Image (spheres, rainbow, N blue to C red):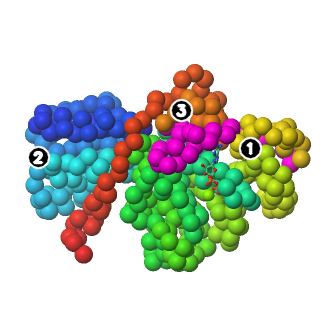
Amino acid sequence: MPTVIVADSLTESRENIKTILRADPTIEVIGEARDGDEALQLVKSLSPDVLILDANIAGIDAIEVTERVSPNVGVIIISLHDDKILLRQLMRAGASDFLLKPVARDELIDAVRVAAMRVQRYRALAAGGSEGRVGQIIAVYSPKGGSGKTVIACNLAVALARHHTGPVCLVDLNLQYGNVDMVLNLMPQHTIASLAQRQGELELEVLERHLTTHEDSGLQVLVAPSTPQYAETVTVYLVEQVLSLLRKGFDYIIVDLPTVLEDYSMVALDTAEYIILVTELDVLAIHNTRVALEILRQLYSPERIKVVLNRANSQVQITPEKVEEVLGCTLLARIPSDGRLVVSSVNNGIPFVLSHPNAEISRSIVQLAYAIMGREAPIGELVQPTKQKRRIPVIGPLIDYLLGPS
Ligand SMILES: Nc1ncnc2c1ncn2[C@@H]1O[C@H](COP(=O)(O)OP(=O)(O)O)[C@@H](O)[C@H]1O
Ligand SMILES: [Mg+2]
């Protein structure tokens, strides 16, 4: 969870910012400062991820404060005036973003998340030599449509974003009929197809601007094209580039795959740390899973392939134990069926792991998330339900602002 210090000489302005940030469960305000001196002291003693700094703060000025704290702390400048000269100086000093007062809620939260992500990456690089972050790709696949890949991928990604401290990303590789954006109620400004023109020069920073934030969890999502025509513009090469860049910026990258194994799905499977193979208690699903397992076991080492049983409590003749016997492996998770909760969750665009964290199905997904993280799952009450918030599109990044309207 990003930690933030707010530095502004005006009490009212500090209060406004704190009110906005406190309403967001994924961001924590850990201090506030009235002048530049106090801001520097607090940064030193509390080491926040992000400093929100008024451009005209009293005491040691904003340029010096920025110079001294960045790049170890992300600096977001807020200002009453659209002063491009001062802004340039602040950017040179290392500020990562700039917002005009009064600050809009979504703009601010987005800026904090982006700044925190960059700082975390910078710190990881500084700590770990030149290699930097190498995130794990978790590919969710099933050789049968309707088995629950998308529902499981979305809720698993949200659970990871909530329970893991580092950045988590979800990629919708259902290029023709992706609906991760609907399951998470996102209003994306970009999709993977908008990256197609950039594929020769793709960098993580560009890619990050094409992600959409899931507000209630902080999860970053690369959404599928809005119509099947755009799917054709997404090449295997682009998918390769996207996944390899995401591994540098995120700890976990969950990939929701289509039922048909396309070339680009193979890219995800090839690079995946774990392939989550979703199956169900029905003969057709089990048959297809067995065939898929045979192929996958020829291609990849068996410990990378994990079978998850969806609708595991359905009262049918087949038992989960029988499935294990037929497939020759232990099930990594058993996700119960909960028609009422899943359907209303999908229809409302609120993942059930957030709206009903203590439902049996949510607990099974959280447990799966912990198994992936290699940690013990918590016992007792899980995270509190959160209210759904509608996302309002945010303005473009600073560079677009500096360049003016195109
Ligand atoms: N555990 C479950 N309990 C009840 N309904 C489920 C469950 N998992 C998935 N569903 C429902 O099954 C349908 C198909 O799920 P989806 O995730 O879209 O499958 P896939 O991505 O594999 O095609 C959806 O309508 C979803 O609401
Ligand atoms: Mg799907």
Where's ligand 2: which quadrant?
bottom right
Neighbours of disc 3 within 10 Å: few (<14), some (14-19), many (20+): many
Look at mark 2 in the image and give the residue it sits on: 56
Residue at horizontal 32%, vertical 57%? 393
Q: CA distance from mark 1 to mark 3?
A: 20 Å
Label 1, on which residue?
309
As drawn, 224 above or below 380? below
Question: Does 335 lie within the magenta span?
Answer: yes
Query: Is 282 in front, or is 154?
Result: 282
Q: Residue 397: horizontal and vertical position, in percent?
A: 30, 61
Q: Is residue 335 above or below residue 229?
A: above
Asked if residue 86 lies left or right of residue 133, the reply is left
Mark 1 or mark 2, which has the lower sequence index? 2
Q: What's drawn in magenta, residue-wise?
A: 327-354
86 relative position to 149: left or right: left
Kind of residue at disc 3: Pro
In the rendered structure, the answer to whether residue 329 lies left or right of residue 345 reads right
How far apart marks 1 and 2 lie (CA) works out to 57 Å
The image shows residue 201, relative to residue 165, as above or below, that is below
Q: Position of residue 402 (x, y in %)?
A: 22, 66
Residue at 71%, 44% (x, y): give it: 310
